[in-house]
Image: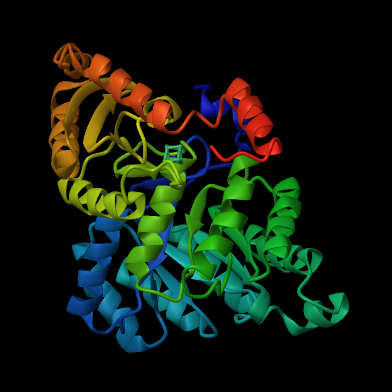
Amino acid sequence: MRDARLFKRPRRQTRPVMVGAVKVGGDAPISVQSMTTTKTHDVDGTLAQVYALAAAGADLVRITCNTVEAAQGLAEIVPRSPVPIIADIHFQYRLALAALESGVCGLRLNPGNIRRPSHIKEVARAAREKQVPIRVGVNAGSLDKDILNRHGDATPEALLESALLEIKYLEEVGFYDIKISVKHSHVPTMIESYRLLSEEVDYPLHLGVTEAGPPPGGLIKSVAGIATLLMEGIGDTIRFSLTADPVIEAESGRRLLEYLDLRERRSLDLIACPSCGRAEVDVIEVAQVAQEALESENLPIQVAVMGCVVNGPGEARSADLGIAAGRGRGHLFIKGKVVRVVPESQMVEALVEEGRRLVEEGVDARLAAADGTAAAQAEADRRQLLEIRPDANSAEQRRQQVAVVAQGKRL
Ligand code: SF4
């Protein structure tokens, strides 16, 4: 398989900022963010969610700071958090100052909601003293009214103008620890907004489709917007804004980066054929059972579940491990090479066992331990199945079938 880096545009160069111990931008790995949904003054409940988000893959967690009690809650949450905490601020600039006092590692300001330049600059001065970065979080739904009126709608140009105006205020007081987002719920507008922004600034960009909604639509919109930009080399940190348990946001963000080869694999990647008339098992059911069993083992490998041994091992040869069904048996393969044949009823069990050993011992050791007769057994099963149902991929066989059908006969 070709190196996936060949397919991506080079990553856009940005000046990094530090959010606590997490570097965002520059050559840092793309980071994953999520946001708690608890009341911030509920310190234990919020911390429990922060831990769950960190375990699911969040490198940074944002928490709302909408009241004095919330700011006080942050003072207790920040020192006990496993990841840097960012305070989300709307409307009241004094709560940004209070959040800084609580020890947060980052602020998010919404330019549409904190309007006075003097207030923005006061927050920037305080943040500069504490070396805390600020995200300029422009959101289509809360765009400054003047800008909205001038552009007639929340266009990419309007979002860009709002971001650049806010950045100007920050830079005027010598503040440069900036990240920026220009989120929109309409995916093409979101993509174009970030493209425009990336041409204007070298600050790190936080990607997201705002108000994406519940899964599956919310997930699809988020992936469409975020992945498109990441493949263009745009984006330094991401957030899926889903109407769902935020753990799903963190997990999805992390998985997206793994699937794009932008972060090291730490979770299972189960691939499976879509099934077809040639399938020898119920692929959907076997894939679901295998996914649950393998996920409970926390195996960071790519595993394939294929419905038939005729095409399975070959089609999934890039997978670390896989299984293909045929003639009442499961054919276990590693990197496309069949290493063991087991009864169909033991397919999933054997797959999990082999996955565990593959992670512990490595590919070479497991290939060396292969059952010497497995490949021949698999080939015999494959041939038998081909005799029953000729390979539909073969051009010559297709020609023969076409001729038979044309003559009005049935196979
Ligand atoms: S692997 Fe076999 S069952 Fe699955 S889609 Fe391909 S031909 Fe059909």
**Which one is in front, 294 or 92?**
294
Whether residue 119 sits left or right of residue 323 in the image: it is right
Answer yes or no: is residue 310 visible.
no
**Which one is in front, 179 or 277?**
277
Q: Position of residue 379 (x, y in %)?
A: 32, 19
Q: Position of residue 336 (x, y in %)?
A: 35, 22
Q: Position of residue 377 (x, y in %)?
A: 23, 19
Answer yes or no: is residue 379 visible.
yes
Residue 180 against residue 355 in the figure, above or below: below
Residue 32 against residue 149 in the figure, above or below: above
Give the quarter of the image for residue 140. bottom right
**Residue at image point 45% right, 47% down:** 274
**Which one is in front, 405 or 95?**
405
Quadrant of ligand 1: it is top left
Q: Position of residue 7 (x, y in %)?
A: 61, 30
**Which one is in front, 350 or 382?**
382
Residue 218 against residue 179 in the figure, above or below: below
**Residue at image point 18% right, 14% down:** 373
